Image (cartoon, grey):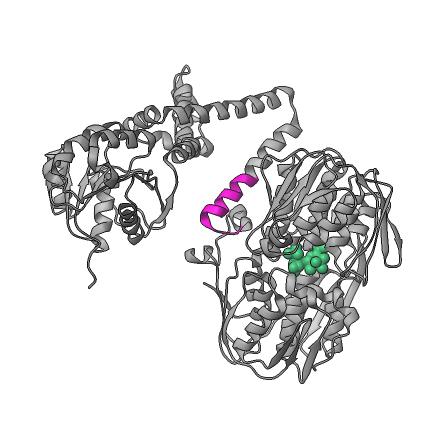
Amino acid sequence: MSEPLFNRIAIIGLGLIGGSFAAAARENGLARSIVAGSRSARTLEQGIALGVVDDGSQDLAEAVKGADLVFVSTPVSAMGKVLAALKPGLSRTAIVTDGGSVKGNVISAARQALGEHYSRFVPGHPIAGKEKSGVSAADATLYRDHRVILTPTDDTDPAATAKVRAIWTAMGAEVLQMSPQYHDQVLAETSHLPHLLAFSLVDTLARQGDSNEIFRYAAGGFRDFTRIASSDPVMWHDIFRENKAALLQALGLFSDGIDRFRDAVEKGDSDALMGIMTRANSARAHFMAMNGRTSYTRAQLGEDSIMTDSSKANPTYLMTPGGKLNGRIRVPGDKSMSHRSIMLGSLADGVTEVEGFLEGEDALATLQAFRDMGVVIEGPANGQVTIHGVGLNGLKAPEKPLYMGNSGTSMRLLTGLLAGQAFDVELTGDASLSKRPMERVAKPLREMGAQITTGNEGRPPVRIRGGQPLKAIHYDLPMASAQVKSAVLLGGLYAEGETSVTEPAPTRDHTERMLGGFGYAVRRDGATSAVNGGGKLTACKLEVPADISSAAFFLVGASIAEGSDVTLPHVGINPTRTGVIDILKLMGADIRLENQRDAGGEPVADIVVKSAPLKGIVIPEALVPLAIDEFPAIFIAAACAEGDTILHGAEELRVKESDRIQVMADGLAALGVDHEVFDDGIRITGGAFGGGEVQSHGDHRIAMSFAMAALRANGPITIHDCANVATSFPGFAQLAGHAGLNLEVK
Ligand code: SPQ
């Protein structure tokens, strides 16, 4: 057995926090002996009887003798006295740490009380607790998966901090480090203020006339909101006094917020009311997602159905080989159109109603950005979103950088749209988005007069200086990109004159079509699209069809798995997006379009696909931009086809959420599929292949493509890093499992 981290731990103050620290140290074998110091003989007896500590003393200096770690968990106001009392017993090398909820005052008290020993004091605060108190409630698992904040100062010995960090980590806690000032401010806002409000609300109502009468009618909302008013008044009295300055500041912020709310209620200002509440709603989902490390969507839906707890971090797909796909599969709404519905709906005059909106991370990032710029947006709920448009010039400056998550479309289109605003703005993204090229949009927009800077090597963050007059340009796109085309056209809405873009090959034209739907004239002439600046968008009703890019996984899955028969209803079949159908058909797939119709300016159909033997082909380069997002899935079809499939002219795949040529090639290699990588494409030789471990590199389309490969693999496939599937296809695992894919999320 390995050496314990400490020889002897002394716990001073044996309540829930101290007792749980002792119990966790014991359960994890972190000390040879554990003793306690407490003024109460009864508590010590209880602790020893429960086996939480080995021994104890009422004399604190006696209790810490021989200890190499002392954990103090007494009320914060008593900390100075307690530290002074135990100091005479401290050995020279002993580390002292604490669990107090306020750090500034505790640090001052420790500096004074510990004198020359102060450098061995590591201030800490475990963010954990329970309704129950006292050593009898001690719980060895209390800190597991909880956060502990350490706030060492410049004088703290880094070696002592490292040892305290190590013991918390060994107890299963996540350790964060920050300055004491920041800790006290954050805790004042997120913990001390809510406790104060709960105490205050109950007290205010209790003081009114017959409070029994009021509380008789109190429903769940009141109970939820005031639960924390049952916390220990003595402890909170201490905290409110000890963290006075930060708490007063938080109260000031809160009363400004209450004044705004009161004003909105008084004036019956429903826009302001909805604004406050929808922003609060989405902000809450955002922090639930961050804290739970779940996707934004899951936090919002409270959905936990098919995943185990640890999967919240970053799920892995465990695929059992074989199976077939059957049934009617309704895939989520189109991502490209969902983004654009929020953007144009926000800039329109009037209220836009959207149906079929994709409640995936990417589209939600766009939605959040517009909320941050003052647009009131209700929903999404079941794909329905109501946007209270503010007009072309009605956006407000956001208070902080706009976070675009994983979404290239959000960042690139917004760069165009924001180039003509009156305010400055910064756009940031996650690790993958932060590696993607942004100069492709910045360059033409600068030609129009925009002031835009990009980060290192032309990547995010993108910073846009407001108040720059834009002038119309003509731009010949150097690459086939709907995002660059759209960014220039959206910038053109704010430019003087006609802005036109000519593309080298057709790319998705949702921006042009949707602008038309909002009553904004777009001149289209062959490969050129053009808008005149200064027009007006009029709110409308929009129906977003199912996303052909999401349907593509099932088109491939059903084609390669014998006995499959799948119907994908209401899928968008805009001719600029149907390259995947054309390519699969050239390979011999059995795909039929039924019930073709028009849905708000976009063609849709039910797609029926049955399994069929596939053969390798040379993919016509003209189809590349029309199937650009579907290549990961098409590569899996190629691995199951007879003969070689050859792709050229697809270098754009290298700058998507991952380098989709290389990452797919690595995954194919892991399964034993013969292939050859080119700068602009790949050759894949179809045939039987095995199982293996695949890294998706956080790319949703790579993860879902290899999930489909399992239908034909001879062994199990493990796909890592699948959290980003939620960017475009929330609920994929469940839906695909329903259709017959053997997928387990771990
Ligand atoms: O938004 P993002 O991350 O760029 O999304 C992707 C995808 O696979 O979901 C690309 F990685 O789709 C793009 C697509 O490749 C969405 C898009 C659009 O909505 O305008 C256009 C295409 O990108 P591009 O660079 O060819 O313009």
| Front residue of 348 and 460 | 460
| Residue 438 place in picture, x, y as percent | 67, 52
Residue 375 placement: quadrant: top right
- Residue 524 vertical placement versus 56 (above, below): below
Using residue 712 as the reference point, say whether residue 494 is left or right of it. right
Q: Which residues are magenta?
A: 282-295
Which residue is located at x 24 percent, y 36 percent? 118
Using residue 720 as the reference point, say whether residue 39 is left or right of it. left
Residue 536 placement: quadrant: top right
| Residue 230 place in picture, x, y as percent | 33, 31
| Front residue of 735 and 85 | 85
Can the viewer see residue 97 in this picture?
Answer: no
Can the viewer see residue 450 in this picture?
Answer: yes
**The magenta stretch spans residue 348:** no
| Residue 371 place in picture, x, y as percent | 63, 38
Residue 431 placement: quadrant: bottom right
- Residue 372 vertical placement versus 459 (above, below): above
| On-image quarter of the N terminus | bottom left
| Front residue of 253 and 218 | 253
Which residue is located at x 39 percent, y 30 percent? 192
| On-image quarter of the C terminus | bottom left
**The magenta stretch spans residue 285:** yes
- Residue 495 vertical placement versus 330 (above, below): above
Q: Majority secondary structure of the magenta segment?
A: helix
| Residue 616 place in picture, x, y as percent | 70, 81
Which residue is located at x 42 percent, y 20 percent? 205
Using residue 242 as the reference point, say whether residue 581 is left or right of it. right
